[in-house]
Amino acid sequence: YDYQKDAVENMRNGCILNGGVGSGKSRTALYYYFKEQDYSMMAYYYRRAIASSINFEINPAELCIKFARYLRKIGEYEDAVSNLCLAESTAKVLEDKSTLYEAQIFLALTYVRMKKFSLAHELAEELLKYQSDLRGGRFVGAWMVKELSVRGLEGPEASRKYLCQLLES
């Protein structure tokens, strides 16, 4: 949240965060700590978590996706792409279609943020080949990624035409 980002910018070692239960004090403090450590400690702990997830029968692809979400939130897009590709490969090996599609949609959205619209469009087209497997939000997510990539590649008018065609079908 914006108020947490503002707090992190104004924080220094030894300061006290003020807020009610559930206001995000712990997450804000953790973000500040990792920022001060140049995010290297965060990467270290996530790599350990992913490695040990196999021992505890936790899907490592889901951990990679969570880590990528955080990386994308702080603007580390290249690292987010790496983690999402790792999640995608892991989900394929584990034959977990649900996590695979989640990773692919999130990867395509990350490409949109990076303004790599052709990569996002290509991935959206690939996802939409499996429409019958996409459930709920993943189906809508795939269409939205395609619309965003069309807007980035061809402009708002092409995007509007695409949405109108989609609504008519």
Image (cartoon, grey):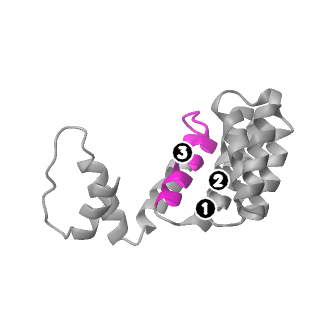
Q: Residue furthest right?
A: 129
Q: Which mark is residue 109?
A: 2
Q: Residue at x 54, y 35 (%)?
A: 56
Q: Earlier in the sequence, mark 2 or mark 3?
A: 3
Q: Residue at x 43, y 60 (%)?
A: 42
Q: Nearer the viewer, residue 24 or 13?
A: 24
Badge 3 marks a residue whose secondary structure is helix
Visible in this render: residue 157?
Answer: yes
Closer to the eye: label 2 or 3: 2
Q: Which mark is residue 93?
A: none
Q: Is residue 67 magenta?
A: yes
Q: Identify which amino acid the numbered label 3 is placed on.
A: Ser
Q: Nearer the viewer, residue 4 or 169?
A: 169
Q: Identify which amino acid the numbered label 1 is placed on.
A: Arg
Q: Are marks 2 and 1 in contact (CB under 8 Å)?
A: yes
Magenta segment boundaries in residue numbering? 52-73
The residue where tag 3 is placed is 52
- Circle 3 packing at 10 Å, graded few (<14), some (14-19), many (20+), is few
Badge 2 marks a residue whose secondary structure is helix
- Quadrant of the rendered image containing residue 120: bottom right
Task: Give how far apart the Cα atoms at labels 2 and 1 are.
Answer: 6 Å
Closer to the eye: label 1 or 3: 1
Q: Are marks 1 and 3 in contact (CB under 8 Å)?
A: no
Q: Which mark is residue 113?
A: 1
**Relative vertical location of residue 45 with respect to residue 125 in this rendering, above or below:** below
